[in-house]
Amino acid sequence: AQKVTQAQTEISVVEKEDVTLDCVYETRDTTYYLFWYKQPPSGELVFLIRRNSFDEQNEISGRYSWNFQKSTSSFNFTITASQVVDSAVYFCALSEESSGSARQLTFGSGTQLTVLP
Amino acid sequence: DTGVSQDPRHKITKRGQNVTFRCDPISEHNRLYWYRQTLGQGPEFLTYFQNEAQLEKSRLLSDRFSAERPKGSFSTLEIQRTEQGDSAMYLCASSLQRLGGSGNTIYFGEGSWLTVV
């Protein structure tokens, strides 16, 4: 069975600090996909990134970067020089290929990030 | 705006009443999903459609829940005889599944908040 664990329930940082959100996953599949979503107070889940299990290259997009390590089953997300607008709940999610092409996402319980001015 | 839209955004109903939510997916997307999210938790999968066919239902989807996508475009989620435990946010999402493709990205709407009193 697939499982996603986000051990950090809440994190508070001061603006301009770097912050890393942890995500650990469990799966028996060799082919799977990992996602990060941002959920601001409005409620919409905003897609940030998708990574497949065969691509362990780290990715950087502006102030966002992701570190995928299969050896530790982790897919951590770092925000550099955080801003108040980054305040939101961040979800890590997993989809197994055997479940059929990402038709079903398993989410972690989320990390509430608060960036203080 | 061509994102996933949901209506109504908020609904307060008395226990025992029926409620219906509507979802309009991104126009070219052939897959449509319903998820449920309770406070402090990540979204949980309920069901999904490939065009008009409902291909999978979670055990969370009790007999009181019914979802339809009659013409393969918009979808409705009806909850009959609502219970207080149904209070949650109901998220709709959509994706484009290409023939032979895998790992499609799922885009979410802003959700419909249900409060059963």
Image (cartoon, coloured by chain):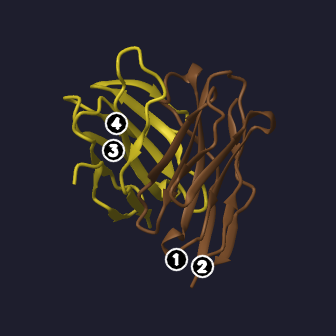
Chain colours: A brown, B yellow
Q: Amino acid at mark 1?
A: Val
Which callout, 3 or 1, points to the residue nearer the camera?
A: 1
Query: Which comes sooner in the sequence, label 2 or label 1?
Result: 2
Q: Position of residue B42 (x, y in %)?
A: 58, 52
For label 3, the crowd category at 10 Å Cα-Cα, with few meaning under 14, some 14 to 19 and many 20 or more, is: some
Q: Is residue B107 visible?
A: yes
| Residue drawn at (48%, 54%) of the image | B86
Separation of disc 3 and disc 1 at Cα? Answer: 38 Å
For label 1, the crowd category at 10 Å Cα-Cα, with few meaning under 14, some 14 to 19 and many 20 or more, is: some
- The answer as to whether the residues below labels 3 and 2 share one chain is no
| Residue drawn at (34%, 36%) of the image | B67
| Residue drawn at (43%, 31%) of the image | B104
Could you say whether the residue bearing mark 4 is in a helix, strand or loop? Answer: strand
Q: Chain of mark 3?
A: B
| 4 and 3 marks in contact (CB < 8 Å) | yes
Q: Which mark is residue A84?
A: 1
Quadrant of the rendered image containing residue A113: bottom right
Q: Amino acid at mark 4?
A: Ala
Mark 4, residue position? B67
Separation of disc 3 and disc 2 at Cα? Answer: 43 Å
Q: Is residue B58 left or right of residue B71?
A: right
Q: Position of residue B105 (x, y in %)?
A: 43, 36
Could you say whether the residue bearing mark 2 is in a helix, strand or loop? Answer: loop
Separation of disc 2 and disc 1 at Cα? Answer: 6 Å
